[in-house]
C-alpha cells in the first residue's frame, strides 16, 4: 500500500537507487534507475517527496564527488516529477542553493 511505501520503504528504496546513479555505466540500466526514481516520487505524494528531498540535500556537504553527482541528478528528477506540484516552490528554494554550493566548491578546487 501507498502508506507503507511512503512511511517505511521509500527512503531506503530511494537511497539505494540514487546511490547507484553515478556508478551505473550501462545507459539502459541508468535510464531504468531514472524511471524507478520518478515512479517512486509520483507514488509517495507531496509529503513523501519532501521527505526524500530532505534526505537528498545534505549530500552536498559530503566530500565524495559520487554523492554530489547523485544529488544533482536526483534534483533533476525531482524537478521533472514536481512539474505542476505543490512542492515546486520548496524544491526551487532548497535545491538551487545546494547546487550553487556544489558549483562554488568545484570552482575552488579547480583554482587550487
Image: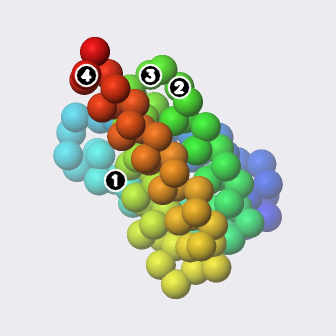
Alpha carbon of mark 4 to alpha carbon of mark 3: how far?
19 Å
Please give the residue where the numbered disc 4 appears in the rendered image: 111
The residue labelled by disc 1 is 32
The reply to whether the C-beta atoms of the residues labelled 2 and 3 are less than 8 Å apart is yes
**Residue 103 visible in the snapshot:** yes
- What residue is disc 3 on? 64
Q: In this view, does 49 lie above or below 59?
A: below
Query: Dot 3, how many residues are within 10 Å of its Cα: few (below 14), some (14-19), or many (20+)?
Result: few
Question: Can residue 21 be seen in the rendering of this structure?
Answer: no
Mark 1 or 3: in front is 3
Q: N-terminal of the two: label 2 or label 4?
A: 2
Q: Nearer the viewer, residue 32 or 92?
A: 92
Numbered disc 3: secondary structure: loop
Q: Where is 45 relative to 9, above or below?
A: below
**Cα distance, mark 4 to mark 1?**
37 Å
What distance separates the C-alpha of mark 1 from that of mark 2?
26 Å
Q: In this view, does 10 lie to the left or right of 106?
A: right
Q: Residue at x 48, y 20 (%)?
A: 63
Name the element at disc 1: helix
For label 2, the crowd category at 10 Å Cα-Cα, with few meaning under 14, some 14 to 19 and many 20 or more, is few
Residue hosting label 2:
62
How many C-alpha atoms fall within 10 Å of the one at disc 4: few (<14), some, or many (≥20)? few
Left or right: 56, with 72 as reference point: right
Tag 4 secondary structure? helix
Amino acid at each position: 500500500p501507498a502508506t507503507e511505501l511512503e512511511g517505511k520503504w521509500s527512503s531506503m528504496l530511494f537511497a539505494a537507487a540514487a546511490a547507484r546513479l553515478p556508478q551505473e555505466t550501462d545507459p539502459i540500466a541508468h535510464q531504468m534507475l531514472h524511471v524507478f526514481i520518478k515512479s517512486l516520487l509520483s507514488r509517495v505524494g507531496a509529503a513523501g517527496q519532501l521527505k526524500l528531498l530532505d534526505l537528498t540535500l545534505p549530500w552536498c556537504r559530503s566530500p565524495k564527488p559520487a554523492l554530489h553527482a547523485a544529488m544533482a541528478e536526483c534534483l533533476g528528477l525531482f524537478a521533472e516529477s514536481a512539474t505542476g506540484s505543490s512542492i515546486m516552490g520548496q524544491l526551487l528554494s532548497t535545491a538551487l542553493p545546494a547546487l550553487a554550493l556544489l558549483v562554488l566548491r568545484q570552482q575552488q578546487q579547480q583554482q587550487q
